[in-house]
Image (spheres, grey):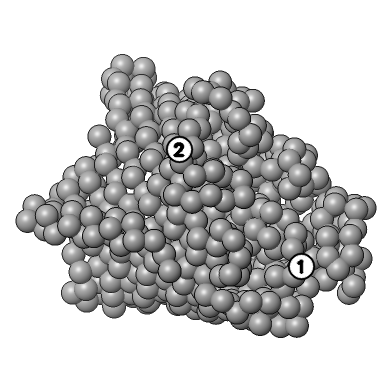
Amino acid sequence: MLPIRTVLFTLLFVAAAAYAQDKKPESAAVQTPVALPPTEFAFGGDFRVRYEAYDSAQTLNCDAPFHIRDYFRLRLRTWESYSPLPNLSFYGRLAAEPRYWFNNATTVSEGKEWKYAILDSLYSKWTTGPASSPITFMLGRQDIQLGDQWLVGDGTPLDGSWTTFFDGARVTIDAKSIKTKFDVIGFNQQAHPKDHFPLLGRQGAYTLMEQDENGAILYASNKSIKNIQLDGYYIYKGDEKVTSNGNNGKAHTLGARVAGTPTAKWQYAVEGAYQWGHRDLQVRYPTTITSSRDISAYAFNSRLTYLFKDALNNQITFLAEYLSGDDPSSTDKDEMFDNLWGRYPRLGETWAVAYVPESGGRSSQYQNLFRTGATWTISPTKDTTIATTYCAMFAPEEVPTRTTNASLYSRDGNFRGHMLQVVAKQKFTKVISGLLFAEASFLGDYYTHHDTITFVRAEVLFTF
């Protein structure tokens, strides 16, 4: 059972919501201006108070020591933007997120966890060229999300939602005559956070990812067909191991995405990708393979949404996703699909952590997966959203080849389990918003212990 402070923080959230109901709803605050008049400065920030608690998500066994882990995360960010010319701007943001742990764990002691403050954005943006085909250059530390953020969404997975940045350059060409945008992106990610920019405070033992990474992306998006968007991309990722959980190797990914709105009430998106290259030191079970293996892997992702367009803004989205797994006894290829920079809790918070012992100690390293399910969303007011999700989770291969603890897996089943998730979001005022998040996953015969793993979150966000 989760601690009483979970209930107390939830009650605090509900009390704030009740107080805010008497206030006139206001539109969301804009944190980053899209455009600024010449020579004008803009600045602001946000402060997020978040309480999180897991039960058995990391241990996959409700009887194991430290199966409950709960803590506060206090993230403070301040930003400033300056535009000396109409087509030139500079943006910087500083972020820090100290935490407070309520229970001992294997790597984190009870009490305060003081980290460092980091520049999680620092870039220049310049637009030039004719109006028919403007070219935009972005240079420096920046957030990059492409498509549905399936493979490109978070460049710094080990610090959670504290930062998501990429260090590099992006060139976007908007060829309006053919209704096509082209992105050319290159970046270098360093595992140690102080390698590219100085920190405020000590780095300590913290890293942003398990390896140094070089990346290159070519991405094209075309809207010449009415109500349809066609995307195509090539992604290169080169890894150089830094920590014991790191990778060595090079992966090439070629993919395509189709999204559209065939009618006013229907939306869809379908994406598929093939991956090749080579990896070193990946297989740990059932036998250890330390030599380099060639990659041959594939994946797809899809969603279909129906919008009721009623008073409650009901909509239902059907989901299906496949990420290939690897069975070394079947071929000499490494058939495990790497989800690249899609390592964030998009499948759910329980699974982001539950994958750690299966993927060599790497959080949100989703692999060997087939899932299907649906999300039902309602918005009774413009400031309130409630989403409920159910997914059935499967493992195409019974063998957990990257596991650090083989005793957690039965090796005699393909069903990972059922996942049920409820997320409530509320905009209280112009500067205050909140979120309640609850998730439970009921483990299936892929695992040794058929336990229930849970996660809860309560959050309040202040913007200024």
Q: Residue at x 61, y 46 (%)?
A: 107
Circle 1 crowding by C-alpha within 10 Å: few under 14, some 14–19, many from 20: some
Residue 289 is situated, as x and y percent measured from the top left of the image, at: 90, 58
Q: Secondary structure at mark 2?
A: strand
Q: Amino acid at mark 2?
A: Lys
Between discs 1 and 2, the one toward the N terminus = 2
Query: Residue 17 vs residue 451: left or right?
Result: left
Kindly report the distance in space between the C-alpha atoms of the residues bearing marks 1 and 2. Answer: 33 Å
Residue at which label 1 appears:
406
Is there any visible trace of residue 222 in the rendered image?
no
Residue 143 is situated, as x and y percent measured from the top left of the image, at: 50, 40
Q: Nearer the viewer, residue 9 or 393?
A: 9
Q: Nearer the viewer, residue 462 or 57?
A: 57
Q: Residue at x 7, y 56 (%)?
A: 22
Residue 371 is situated, as x and y percent measured from the top left of the image, at: 58, 75
Circle 2 crowding by C-alpha within 10 Å: few under 14, some 14–19, many from 20: some
